[in-house]
Amino acid sequence: MKSLSDDLLVETYYKAIELQLSSDFIMLIKEEIEKRSLLDKIKKTS
């Protein structure tokens, strides 16, 4: 995931939720978002 830009990572997170992909995959994306300190870019409702 390190090759994804921050914006693309956040976009991927929202798209994964929209497409109802596996919760494990969504959690992996969210963990990477947390590592990059990007939680302020995603809604707190997730």
Image (tube, rainbow, N blue to C red):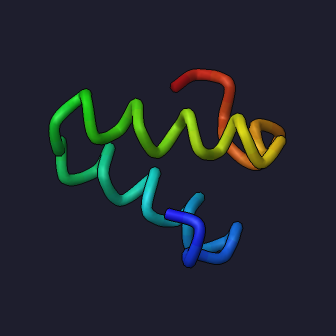
Give the answer, above or below, for where 34 lies relative to 46: below
- Relative to residue 14, is residue 37 drawn left or right? right
Figure quadrant of residue 43: top right
Q: Position of residue 13 (x, y in %)?
A: 45, 52
Residue sitting nearer the eye, 22 or 14? 22
Give the farthest residue toward the front. 2
Give the answer, above or below, for where 45 lies relative to 43: above
Residue sitting nearer the eye, 22 or 17? 22
Give the answer, above or below, for where 35 lies relative to 3: above
Give the answer, above or below, for where 27 lies relative to 1: above
- Relative to residue 25, is residue 31 drawn left or right? right
Tell me which residue sits at (19%, 53%) in the image.
19
Q: Position of residue 39 (x, y in %)?
A: 75, 37
Tell me which residue sits at (53%, 37%) in the image.
30
Figure quadrant of residue 25: top left
Residue sitting nearer the eye, 2 or 15? 2
| Total number of numbered discs in the rendering | 0
Tell me which residue sits at (58%, 22%) in the image.
45
- Relative to residue 8, is residue 23 drawn left or right? left
Q: Position of residue 38 (x, y in %)?
A: 78, 46
